Structure formats: C-alpha cells, structure tokens
Image (spheres, rainbow, N blue to C red):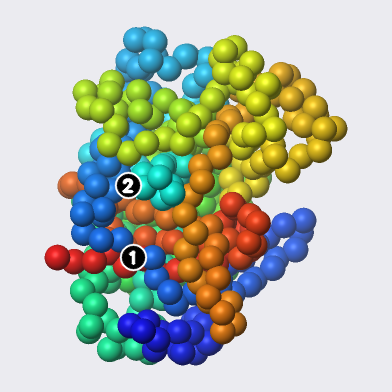
Amino acid sequence: MELKELRQQAPLINRQMARYGVQFGIYKNGQFDERLFPFDPLPRVIDTGEFDLLRRGLTQRVNALNRFLSDIYDQKRILADGVIPEDFVYRSPGYLAQCEGIGAPRDIHSHISGIDLVHGKDGSWYILEDNLRIPSGASYPLIARTLCRRCSPQTFRDNHIVDNRDYGQMLSDVMSYVNRGGINVILTSGRYNSAYFEHSYLAEQSGAVLAESSDLYVENQTVYYRGNSGPVRVGTIYRRIMDEYLDPLCFKPESLIGVPNLMSAYRAGNVAIVNAPGNGIADDKGIYYFVPKMIRYYLDEEPILKNAPTYLPFFEEDRDYVLENAHTLVIKDVAESGGYGVVFGSKLDVRKLDKLRTAIQREPRRFIAQEVVNFEDLSLMEGDQTVYRKADLRAFVLSGETTRVWASGLTRFSRDPSSFIVNSSQGGGFKDTWVLSH
C-alpha cells in the first residue's frame, strides 16, 4: 500500500525517462541500437544493519584491490610470495605492460569501483564480479529517484530512506582529491557510447567538463582543454573509454577516440586518470578467485563478504572437477563482459557440453567456473500483475581521501523468468535501491 502511488505513476516515470534520454545503447555488428532502459518502480530495500555489513565488506574488498594494483605494477610482492601464480597474471588480457612503474596519484588506482553482488536465498551476500575499469550505472538510480520523488513525494515523506543525491558531490570530491592542477574532465567517446546518457548526466551532477578526444591535447606532457577563451589545463580525467583506445601512441594506433600522448602526461604525474589504466588485471574474472587471499595478504583480515564458490581450470585439481561437473556449473569466459560468455552447463546438450569441455582443456586460463548461487527474486510490475525475477546489485565504492560506499546502487533484474542473467545488454531492467536510515 505504501508504494501504491509509485505503482500508479510507473508509466509516467518511464515516459519521463525516455524524454530525458535514459537509454542504454548497444553497438553490435555495425548497428547502433538505442533502447529505453526499463525501470520498475518497486525498489530493492536494504535495512540499516544489512547495509552496514555491505559497507564494511565492500570497503575492505576495494582497499585490498587498490593495494594489489599498486603492488602488481611496481614491487610485485604478491607474486614473489606465491600468493598468485606469476604466469596467471602475465597471461591476463587485462595486464598492461605499458603501465609498469607508473605511480597513480595518491596511490589510488580504482577510484570508482562497481562491485556486483547477489543476495542468496540462504541470507548471505555473494560477490560475483569486481568492475574496476569503467563501471557504469550510477546515473540510473540517481535519475530514477529524482523522477520518483517528483511523481510521488508522499512516498519519500512516509519512508525513512537515505538520500542518494550526494553521488555527484562524492564523485567531484574523488576527482578533486587526485587532481594534479587544473579542471576536472569526463572523457566520452560521444553519443554512440552505450552509456552516453550517464557521461553527460554525471558531468552535470559533479560539475566536471564533458569532453571528447578532439577537445583535449597534450603539450609538454601536460593535458589541455580547448576552452572558448583559450586552453585550460586539465588536472583529472574521468575517462569513460577502454584502456586500449585511450592513447593511440601507447595502445591501439588506430584509435580515433583517444588523446595522443595522454599516457606520457600521466607517467610524468601531470594528470590523474580515473580509473587508472591497467585496472583490467584486477577485474579479470580469473583474478577474482584470488581476492579473498589479497584481503588476507594485504590487510591481514578475514573477508567480510563471500565470493561465489569458484573453480579455476588453470589448476589441475579444479580443472578435473569442472570437467566432471560442467553440467551443473556456470562457466564464464574471463575476457567477456556484459553477460556475454556466460554459459549454464545445465542448459547445454551433450554435444555442446563436450565442445565446452574441449575448449576448457585447450585453454584453461580462459575460463572460470562457479556453483550456481540460488539468489533471491525481487517483485516487479508486469502490466497490472506482480511477478518475481532474479536481481543483482551493483554497489558503487568511491576511493578518495577515504573509501566510501554510496548508500544506493543499481539493482538490475532479468525480464526473462527462466534467466539468471540481469545485464542491461541482455535486455534486463533496473530498480532504485533504498537504504533505510535509522
């Protein structure tokens, strides 16, 4: 009954989202498909005690991952001490030799971390993935909350919900903390990026300048923005393009969306890049297996939040188990993202299972396997009916002067009743996430 007004206003809220351009674009096979990111008005609700557990566990995890990133491109103590196999790291597609020896400003590599969790039916939270390159999605619960508040102010007067409108200030604080002298810029590849709405919205919310590569240039190892009144020095770049396209003189020479010599300015310490180049090694799905060991190694603490039960075919014992039990496991290709490359063994016929086993035997480093976590279904509206679908939570952790967990998050749900895959690129929708105050 408390959400009755939000239910009634759902069509209006989605129409307003379409007007604001709250869309998720997919560029695939030479075609750009821009679609509305469907919003469901029934929120995920997290109580105060539960959020405190998440806050402590996520802070611990991101602090350990930042320590790992500093170490792996410098002293490599974790390799020397045998915590992670050396060749496992160097064979990762996310490891960038070009980042060797570069000290990130303030020693922070992952400034905005998107950690994907599910709430198991056993009552435990399980972390599925760490996204430390360019995690997207914070803008969607921000705009959704704004529109819901406008359509149903009584709902927010009657419920004690932590205000989530501080994300823009949190982002601004992080960029300013690592700033090397100059303006804060959000670097976008343009409107054909799948998350372009977010780029422009976060620039507005944080007070940063939205720029494309043609707006920036490097001179004397310093980055400048082509302002209306002349060049303006840039101190922080919140880049929303992948590492390999960031600087055509350092990575892919054919890139037209990067800034030539940007990496030389970064190496010289004259600009901060948020998130730091090279973070892909830490959100490699194979490295995910070792994060609990990182927490023990760097922080001397026991992990507060659990990984999903995971097996690495890279290790012979795990490989034997995966090959024998492939029909019950979730197999993930470590180089894929957005829900692609995820295979449920239970849905494969004998021929496809044999083909998968052959691929695992041939390239064991390429895959991880996980037990299927029976995670909770959340209620959502389908016409006039309430139905239940699988949903995850992307929590946002911002690392600046301190590490802070945003009291909100992106709850994504599957629109297919038989699917566990909730990614927007796979046709999923999203909800607001309410954290209750005391």
| Residue 425: image location, x then y, percent | 62, 58
Of 245 and 403, nearer the camera is 403
Q: How many discs appear?
A: 2
109 with respect to 254 (left or right): left
Q: Is residue 123 above or below residue 69?
A: below
Q: Tell me the crowding category of disc 2: few under 14, some 14 to 19, or many 20 or more residues within 10 angstroms, Cα based.
A: many
Q: Are the two marked residues, 1 and 2, in contact with CB atoms closer than 8 angstroms?
A: no
Of 91 and 83, nearer the camera is 83
Q: Which circle's residue, 1 or 2, is located before the other in the chain?
A: 1
| Residue 166: image location, x then y, percent | 24, 67
At 42% from the left and 42% from the top, the residue drawn is 127
162 with respect to 102 (left or right): left
At 43% from the left and 47% from the top, the residue drawn is 120
Indicate the quadrant containing the N terminus: top left, top right, bottom left or bottom right.
Answer: bottom left
In the picture of the structure, the residue carrying the numbered disc 1 is 45
Q: Which mark is residue 142?
A: none
At 25% from the left and 28% from the top, the residue drawn is 302
| Label 1 vs label 2, nearer the camera | 1
| Residue 135: image location, x then y, percent | 45, 52
Q: Is residue 387 above or below residue 334?
A: below
Mark 2 lies on a secondary structure that is loop
Report the residue that reaches farthest toward the right: 351
Q: Amino acid at mark 1?
A: Val
At 39% from the left and 10% from the top, the residue drawn is 82
| Residue 56: image location, x then y, percent | 22, 44
Quote the CA–CA distance across marks 1 and 2. 26 Å
Indicate the quadrant containing the C terminus: top left, top right, bottom left or bottom right.
Answer: bottom left
Q: Which mark is residue 111?
A: 2
Q: Amino acid at mark 2?
A: His
Mark 1 lies on a secondary structure that is strand
